[in-house]
Amino acid sequence: MSSIATNIQERKGGTPALMALAISAFGIGTTEFVPVGLLSSLANDLNISITLAGLLISGYAMGVAVGAPILTAATNKMSRKSLLMMLMLIFIVGNSVAALSANFALLLVARFITAFSHGVFFSIGSTIAADVVPENKRASAIAFMFTGLTVATVTGVPLGTFVGQTFGWRATFWGVAFLGIIAIIASAILIPATLKQAPPSKFSDNFKVLTNGPLLLTFAITALGYGGTFVAFTYLAPILETITGFEPSAVSIILLVYGIAVALGNTMGGKLANKTPLKALLWMFFIQAVVLFVLTFTAPFKVLGIVTIFFLGLLSFMNVPGLQIYVVQLAEKYVPSAVNVASALNIAAFNVGIAIGAFIGGLIVDSIGIIHTPWIGGVMVMGAVLLTFWSSILEKRGRI
């Protein structure tokens, strides 16, 4: 009876907190990915190349990678509710500066600073989401929080693209800053002040995360598996315009289709990863790699291209809950006092993957052509398949 009462109490307390986290994730997800639909507009307005404009995505990702582990460790003793609200304040300021940017350099700096809020938010948010639900629902809880990120790809990114194409890209960043205001209000109202505080970690504990073999292997899987998609996704709008032959006005609609698939995939990924995350991840990555290879051949055809992009969306975020909960599980086993830092480093790994993928994509666009971005992204994801298989073998032998 006591365990049932505890679970009911956890669910009652957990739902509002998860809602607030999802709302904040929606704003953060919108600002991360909205430049994908605005690359052409940004490049034309700022008189830069498409490849240079792509740095707004890879530069943001590097900001997350740099800021996440450092700020998570530095704010370890801070109230988690106060920290989340402070992060959204950074988010609001960063997007406001982006909207006011007079040149590409300032816009890039604004994106880099805004990214600091992203990494810490998702690392802390993942541990909060896992703490406020029963043990067997942790991956689903993390998936629910990331629903905000995926809904951003369904509505925020296409809407931001439409606003940017209609009123100019600055209007998009002002709109995203307003989303931050809504998120900070939601956090103030819905997140309880009595959240369980993570145990304080020592610097030596944080160092253990960086020297732990199973965790480092998982970070590599995250970077390759998640980042591989961004070799092509970063340049999805130019692919749709130059290879498939769609008008720019149709791109936002196709991004909506992609986003719907992302939302479905994220939910499915959370359910699949609740019991055996590693096994689920192996199949997710394999199918994801196949879809990327297929896109190389279907991109020139409108119907087949959209169908392939739908499946790419379905798989591109499906691995997120499994990767994040697997890192939390490993950290709880090997470095329980530094779970937040391990979670932050995995968020950093996601974004290192994005940065690498976007950078490789830029090289491909400038050298052999944009049509080759999907299959090269597939090769990157196949690297994650091999590492996940290796990790599974180590787990079966009791080395993890």
Image: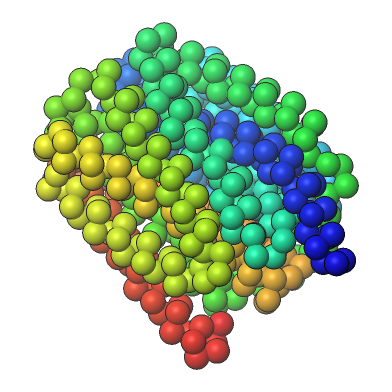
Q: Residue at x 44, y 35 (%)?
A: 153
Q: Quadrant of residue 147?
A: top right
Residue 220, image x and y in percent?
A: 45, 65
Question: How many marks overall?
Answer: 0
Residue 120 vs 211, above or below: the answer is: above
Is there any visible trace of residue 400 in the rendered image? yes
Q: Residue at x 37, y 62 (%)?
A: 284
Q: Split into 4 quadrants, where in the image is the N terminus?
A: bottom right
Q: Residue at x 39, y 69 (%)?
A: 282
Position of 271 with respect to 295 (left or right) is: right
Residue 38, image x and y in percent?
A: 36, 24
Position of 270 with respect to 308 (left or right) is: right
Residue 41 vs 213, above or below: the answer is: above
Q: In the rendered view, how is the structure colored?
A: rainbow
Position of 388 with respect to 382 (left or right) is: right
Q: Quadrant of residue 253?
A: top left
Q: Residue at x 30, y 61 (%)?
A: 287
